[in-house]
Structure formats: C-alpha cells, structure tokens
Amino acid sequence: MLYSPRQSLPISAIPQQRSPEPERRRDTSTPPRPTASVPSRDKDTPWHAEAVCRRDEAGLFFAPSKEPTAARLSREDAAKRVCAGCPVRVECREHALVQPEPYGVWGGLTAAERRVLLARRRRRAVATAR
C-alpha cells in the first residue's frame, strides 16, 4: 500500500487548493474557510512514514469480499475520518491518483471518488489544450 510515487503532481493540480478561475469568482461576502496547516517534513523521510493509517488496521481502508453496502459506507466513513487528521493526506491522495490505486481509501477518497476526480482532471486537461 505504501510506495513512493513515481511522479508527483503539483499541489496546484488539486482542485480544492487552486485559486478561483477568473470567470467563476467565488462569493467574497462570506469569510473563507480556514485551511489546515501542513507541518513541514524532512525531505529524506518518505511521506508514508508519517501516515496516520500506519497505526490502523488495513481492513478499515480496504473492503473485505462481499461486504454489504451499509457496512462498506460505514467503514469508508471511518477511514475518511482517519484520513482527515493525517498530515500526509495530500501526498497519499496524489500517490493513489498517479499509480493509480484501484482499491481502498487513499487520501480520504474511495476508489470511485478517485475515478471521478481523474476523469475531471482529464476533461480539464483536454479543455485547456484546445
């Protein structure tokens, strides 16, 4: 589960962290949400060494065979809560998108959510290439 990514996407490629596009400015009448600060890490330490999930059961992040839908949703929510407090969530998410990891919760996203995000990125890349 924990490999160094062959390549990494720039942080600006993550939709949640990009500034608004000029044609679609967000409403500035409400204050922006606070963003979590990411502590700096030693460059020689692989990102997965600091992953919170290293202390948890892999069963929380990966589905057993024939898991009922209600159990899957509950397990995925619990895994996402673990990811929410992880200092390397962004690196983990990018790893799962670059590899691509076909199973499990990585960086707070399920496999289905990662497929949707990858499809959006591809469509955006095609649209900007025109």
Image (cartoon, grey):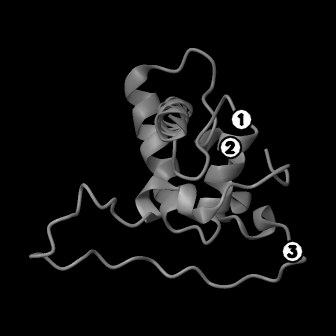
Residue 58 visible to an observer of this rendering = no
Q: Is residue 75 above or below residue 4?
A: above
Q: Quadrant of residue 12?
A: bottom right
For image coordinates 60% across by 29% down, the residue present is 63
Disc 2 residue crowd, few under 14, some 14–19, many 20+, Cα 10 Å: many
Q: Is residue 88 left or right of residue 125?
A: right
| Residue of label 3 | 45
**In screen coordinates, is 110 left or right of 55?**
left
| Label 1 crowd (10 A; few <14 / some 14-19 / many >=20) | some
Q: Position of residue 93 (x, y in %)?
A: 62, 51
Which residue is denoted by mark 2 in the rendering? 96
Are the two marked residues, 2 and 1, in contact with CB atoms closer than 8 angstroms? yes
**Residue at mark 1:** 100
Say what amino acid the circle numbered 3 marks: Thr
Tag 2 secondary structure:
helix
User: Quadrant of the image for the N terminus?
Assistant: top right
Look at label 1 and name its amino acid: Pro
Percent from the top left, x then y, of residue 30?
12, 75
Q: Quadrant of residue 64?
A: top right
Secondary structure of the residue carrying tag 3 is loop
